[in-house]
Amino acid sequence: PVEDIRKKLLTQRRTLFRQAAQTEDELLWLETDVESEVQERGQGEKMVQLLDRLDERMKAEIESIDRALVKLGTARYGKCEQCGKDIHQSRLEALPAAAMCMVCAQAGENKAALRK
């Protein structure tokens, strides 16, 4: 199952970058180098160009995917970053990059809504 989650996360990440890609060369690079880029955590010129084109929401989504990929295969994956409890399996299947359990995520959304 870990490999399935990794593939799902990498597909989501690739899709976000594909939305920002503007040239055939960048699309080709995404198909060949995104997985090794995550593993190396490098910031090559093409990566920087693509990141510059992403909006804040997309950048945040990629950052959460990257954090999940780093945690994957460790005891930290699937643990809520707020309360430390296990994130329910159904939530992880739907949102493999989820960093919080439903209770903490909803509490955060409620606080954000009150600030508006």
Image (cartoon, rainbow, N blue to C red):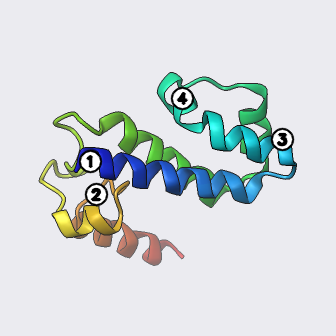
Tell me the SS state at disc 4.
helix
From mark 4 to mark 1, how far is it between C-alphas?
26 Å
Disc with the residue nearer the chain's start (1 vs 2): 1
Tell me the SS state at disc 1.
loop
Disc with the residue nearer the chain's start (4 vs 2): 4
Residues at circles 4 and 3 in contact by the CB criterion of under 8 Å: no
Disc with the residue nearer the chain's start (4 vs 3): 3
Give the mark toward the camera: 3 or 2: 3
Which amino acid lies under the numbered mark 3 shown in the image of this protein?
Asp
Residue at mark 2:
100
From mark 1 to mark 2, how far is it between C-alphas?
6 Å
Residue at mark 4:
36
- x 38%, y 40%: residue: 69
Q: Is residue 50 left or right of residue 13?
A: right
Which amino acid lies under the numbered mark 4 shown in the image of this protein?
Ser
Residue at mark 3:
25
The x and y percentages for residue 94 are 33, 69
Residues at circles 1 and 2 in contact by the CB criterion of under 8 Å: yes
From mark 4 to mark 2, how far is it between C-alphas?
27 Å
From mark 4 to mark 3, how far is it between C-alphas?
17 Å
